[in-house]
């Protein structure tokens, strides 16, 4: 029987395996009738990294594998380091050359598996191993994930703080590809660059209730930019509790608190009066303080003026860094449920404030609607991340515009 003619193009499933560097495809060459005894492809390929003899590859240079001779071609390549990290790569349409497209780690050991096909369609195999050298610089890019490990509300973003600013898009792509967030149940999510040193990660919608979220970095040993290499990072594990949402209707002077979609309490409240209107939009609980001394001077009110105040406040739940709280306001109980008389906070009776204080946790959602105030800003005054729609959020990722399919796939976490 004469062999089937070769097809000089790459199938979509083969290309997916090469570029993602993971998984087994349905059209693996094991289905080839001669695959039971693949030949040794050592004579059919050349490799630009030193193999054996104690030599080490330069991690600054890409891997390159070339098909030698006439008639043969490369069909698949996978490259992984000892930590299980895959190297992305591209295979030419004619199968004569494969090269890596993601950086190698320094001081790592790699295993490369190459599949080939000769002029008669018979499959070949070759497994190569090599080590990469140490970087020439000791400068490392550190990553610190936040918040602290624990249980949070479903609105809590994951944060990543870098030890040095990154302004180049190429460097940001390297970092973003290496920072992983996985959740169980799995949800779609993405990183957003807040500034040159800070990234936030959130799902398209809020996290599911009772989810487990893990953040970790694959950046160690990876070249980020000239004379800058990735350092080690401590992984983070978070869990979420019930979905707790407090919706404040400033016009109706009422707050509805929901747990997992069901209203569990309605509270008469007062919000910011004219000139001090409460911010609209979604905020996230930042923390809880049993006692806070609140002064008008802290928000720009002139000392001794008619609007000045200096009050002891109890059961204060913070929602912005600038000093917006949900708190007990016994001095305004006559206006709660009927008028807005505060300087921007949401006030309620002491009993209701104590209940709210005990019910919510950091990461829970506090949403204000129908206020005459400005919208909550996304990043400079707490966690206003949810006030960006999903399309605008994704634009803050270095991997979205013009990215390859495998880059876009990294924006969606999978179960661990």
Image: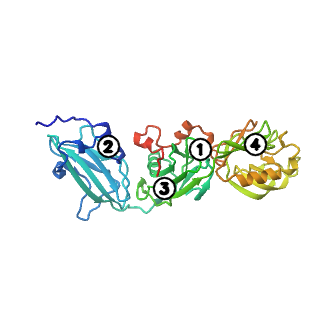
Residue 121 point in image, percent of width and height: 17, 40
Where residue 216 is drawn, which disc sits there? 3
Q: Earlier in the sequence, mark 2 or mark 4?
A: 2
Q: Which residue is mark 1?
A: 206
Farthest-out residue, bottom: 54
353 on left or right of 154 = right
Decide which of 371, 142 is in the foreground and name it: 371
Q: Earlier in the sequence, mark 4 or mark 1?
A: 1
Q: Which residue is mark 4?
A: 255
Spatial distance from mark 2 to mark 3, Cα to Cα? Answer: 27 Å
Depth check, mark 3 against mark 1: the one in front is 1
Is any atom of residue 197 visible in this view? Answer: no
Depth check, mark 4 against mark 3: the one in front is 4
Spatial distance from mark 3 to mark 1, Cα to Cα? Answer: 20 Å
Residue 320 point in image, percent of width and height: 70, 49
Spatial distance from mark 4 to mark 1, Cα to Cα? Answer: 20 Å
Q: Earlier in the sequence, mark 4 or mark 3?
A: 3
Q: Could you tell me which residue is drawn at 36 percent across and 45 percent down?
A: 20
């Amino acid at each position: 029987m004469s062999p089937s003619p070769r097809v000089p193009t790459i199938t979509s499933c083969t290309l997916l395996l090469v570029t993602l560097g993971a998984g087994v495809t349905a059209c693996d060459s094991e289905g080839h009738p001669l695959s039971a005894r693949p030949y040794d492809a050592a004579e059919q390929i050349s490799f630009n990294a030193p193999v054996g003899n104690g030599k080490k590859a330069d991690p600054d240079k890409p891997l390159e594998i070339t098909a030698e001779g006439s008639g043969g071609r490369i069909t698949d390549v996978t490259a992984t380091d000892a930590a299980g990290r895959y190297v992305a790569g591209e295979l030419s349409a004619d199968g004569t050359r494969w090269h890596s497209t993601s950086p190698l780690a320094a001081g790592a050991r790699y295993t490369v598996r190459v599949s080939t096909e000769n002029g008669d369609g018979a499959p070949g195999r070759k497994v190569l191993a090599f080590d990469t050298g140490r970087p020439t610089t000791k400068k490392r890019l550190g990553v610190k994930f936040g918040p602290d490990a624990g249980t949070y509300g479903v609105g809590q973003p994951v944060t990543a703080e870098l030890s040095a600013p990154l302004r180049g898009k190429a460097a940001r792509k390297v970092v973003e590809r290496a920072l992983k967030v996985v959740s169980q149940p799995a949800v779609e999510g993405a990183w957003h660059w807040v500034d040159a040193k800070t990234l936030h990660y959130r799902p398209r919608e809020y996290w599911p209730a009772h989810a487990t979220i893990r953040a970790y970095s694959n950046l160690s040993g990876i070249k980020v930019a000239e004379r800058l290499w990735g350092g080690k990072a401590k992984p983070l594990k978070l869990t979420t509790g019930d979905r707790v949402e407090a919706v404040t209707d400033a016009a109706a002077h009422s707050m509805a608190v929901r747990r997992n979609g069901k209203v569990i309490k309605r509270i008469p409240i007062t919000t910011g009066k004219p000139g001090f209107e409460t911010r609209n939009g979604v905020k996230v609980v930042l923390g809880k303080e049993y006692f806070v001394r609140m002064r008008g001077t802290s928000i720009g009110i002139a000392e001794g003026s008619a609007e000045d105040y200096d009050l002891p406040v109890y059961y204060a739940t913070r929602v912005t860094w600038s000093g917006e709280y949900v708190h007990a306001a016994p001095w305004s109980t006559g206006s709660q449920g009927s008028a807005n008389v505060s300087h921007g906070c949401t006030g309620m009776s002491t009993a209701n404030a104590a209940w709210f204080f005990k019910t919510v946790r950091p990461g829970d959602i506090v949403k204000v609607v129908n206020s005459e105030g400005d919208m909550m800003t996304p990043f400079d005054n707490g966690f206003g991340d949810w006030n960006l729609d999903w399309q605008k959020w994704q634009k803050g990722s270095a991997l979205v515009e013009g990215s390859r399919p495998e880059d876009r796939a990294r924006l969606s976490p999978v179960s661990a």
